Amino acid sequence: MRLMTSQRLSHKERIQLLLAGERIERTPASFWRHFYHKKRTAEGLAESMLHFQEKFDWDFMKVNPRASYHAQPWGAVVEYSRNELVKTKIIDYPIKAIQDWKRVEPKRVSSPALAEQLQALTLIGKKLKGNLFFLETVFTPLSVAGYLVPEKEWLVKHLRENPDLIHQALEAITQTFEKFVEEVLNTGASGIFLATTHWATSNSITKEDYLQFGKPYDLRILNRVKDAELNVLHVCESNNFLESFKDYPVSVVNWDAADPTNLTPEQGHDFLNKTVLGGVNHQKELLDPDPTQVTEQAIQQRSKMEERRWMLGPGCSIPPETPPSNLARLRNLVEEWRI
């Protein structure tokens, strides 16, 4: 499907005006996905992100690195994927017993996995030449800790048995990523896409647990980039703790608003008083080969978000098998909405 675009506003201008509460000529849109087979090198990651952007001309780019880059500085061993549809796997985890958390110490941004990410961002920034907002995906410190163990239940058990030890590890992780996100901005990136993954949800821990082991460290990361042009908070999964993030210093919040256990986009906007990114069910309508359903969903969401700050997007990374025709249809749709 041919894409229809217009340059009345640049992508950056459109988002800047939206965040400022100004009326804009169309709804911004962005979708993001993994290219698992391209994530072994900085060059491969940069190439896949740039190609996806060139194909669909999104209003901003969310860089989708392999999740395991967060754990590799502490010794996670990775089996890289050669298949576009198969995730890279961690095959050996650093934490095998509770006392192993003592070995989680601050790491330098020159650690290979972190340095590789900075190189990829630099390559992307040179290609985009400041014409598009692009964000590096960074996991919250608690989420990074969750990638150091084979099962998330291990971390839950350990934080209950020895909270001081887990706080010690979270401090080391936070110090590492405080320095990393500062370097992210030095590559030309516009900000970060901070993701809670499996942790800001009652599916894993209590809200009280998150307020103790999650939020203080999240805020330290965000405060290091509080002056960035664009920061997005992504709250993953069902039964999320979205209401706990009202005071986070971010411009935009993204979550799975299609899940009936979470707030709707309009509810989240009104409660948080932040720009909402979402409105498309990436696990259902977006996967339907017939674009009718996802088109109607986007149209309905637009009517509900009238007079609210909103960008069209998914509730999380879209599946690699998403029909490209559906993405093209949605990209064309926002052009059709021009006023």
Image (cartoon, rainbow, N blue to C red):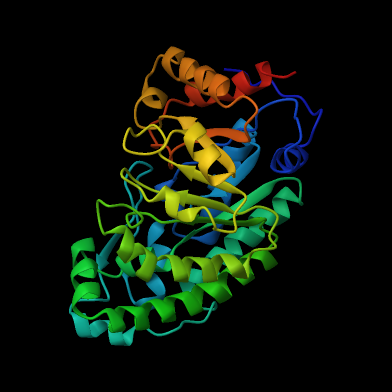
**In the image shown, does 4 or 238 lie closer to the viewer?**
238
Residue 143 drawn at (x, y percent): 37, 63
- Quadrant in which residue 212 is drawn: bottom left
**In the image shown, does 136 or 242 lie closer to the viewer?**
242
In the image, is 187 to the left or to the right of 8? left
Residue 36 drawn at (x, y percent): 40, 48
Residue 333 drawn at (x, y percent): 60, 19
- Give the number of marks: 0
Q: Is residue 65 visible?
A: no
Residue 119 drawn at (x, y percent): 60, 65
In the image, is 233 to the left or to the right of 83? right
- Quadrant in which residue 30 is drawn: top right
Q: Which quarter of the figure is the C terminus placed in? A: top right
User: Eyeballing the image, is 173 above or below 252?
Assistant: below
Q: Can residue 2 be seen in this view?
A: yes
Query: Which residue is outermost to the right?
Result: 8
Point 40% across, 58% down: residue: 67
User: Eyeballing the image, is 258 above or below 116?
Assistant: above
Point 45% across, 83% down: residue: 106
Point 32% across, 63% down: residue: 208
User: Eyeballing the image, is 250 above or below 144?
Assistant: above
Q: Which quarter of the figure is the N terminus placed in? A: top right
In the image, is 212 to the left or to the right of 20? left
User: Eyeballing the image, is 225 above or below 106?
Assistant: above
